[in-house]
Image (spheres, helix red, strand yellow):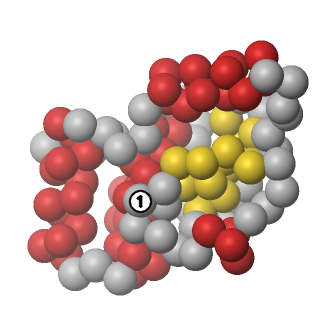
Amino acid sequence: MSIHYSSLPRSQNIEAFERLRESLGLNREEFVALLEAEEERPAFDPMKVRDLLKTERARGREPGYLLLGKREMVSFYHFVSRGPDEDVGVPERDFYFFGVKVVGVERWSCVELAVDDLRDQAA
């Protein structure tokens, strides 16, 4: 497994992963299994989401939010952790993807675009 860490010191990376694991309600074995599965087939596919955004914009709709389930949020955090100077597993931080705010929802799996922040409805 080659989980990519950010530029934070090792202790802060571990704390960030631990907070993420706790927020998902997973034990350590389940969390490691999720991360290993993520290495083989990421739940967050940036090209698919980009294409979904292009399709919506071509239809004249301008989504304001990308709603991601817990599984996809783990994948998204892993995705951004590979970028320069990004923090991994920091849910307090606002993230944007192609100009759309990324919002986590309480469902296990979800990838939806929304005009409004529909976290309550998507739970």
The answer to whether residue 99 of the structure is visible from this angle is: yes
Instruction: Give the amino acid type for the residue marked by disc 1 in the picture.
Output: Ser
Q: Is residue 54 or residue 5 the one in the foreground?
A: 54
The answer to whether residue 81 of the structure is visible from this angle is: no
Q: Is residue 11 above or below residue 1?
A: below
Instruction: Determine which residue is flagged by label 1.
Output: 109
Q: Is residue 81 or residue 50 the one in the foreground?
A: 50
The percent position of residue 99, horizontal first and vertical second, equals 78, 33
Residue visible at 67% across and 21% down? 55
Q: Is residue 34 above or below residue 102?
A: below
The quadrant in which the C terminus is found is bottom right
Q: Is residue 114 or residue 35 the one in the foreground?
A: 114
Tell me: 61 left or right of 74: right
Q: Quadrant of residue 34?
A: bottom left
Label 1, residues with CA under 10 Å away: few <14, some 14-19, many ≥20: some
Q: Identify the element where label 1 is drawn.
A: loop
Q: Quadrant of residue 56?
A: top right
Tell me: 55 left or right of 110: right
Q: Is residue 45 above or below residue 34?
A: above
The percent position of residue 103, horizontal first and vertical second, equals 66, 58
Residue visible at 62% across and 68% down? 122
Residue visible at 59% across and 63% down? 104
The quadrant in which the N terminus is found is top left
The percent position of residue 16, horizontal first and vertical second, equals 45, 66
The percent position of residue 66, horizontal first and vertical second, equals 66, 47
Residue visible at 24% across and 54% down? 35
Q: Residue furthest front?
A: 59
Q: Quadrant of residue 78?
A: top left
Count the labels in the image.
1
Q: Is residue 63 or residue 13 the one in the foreground?
A: 63
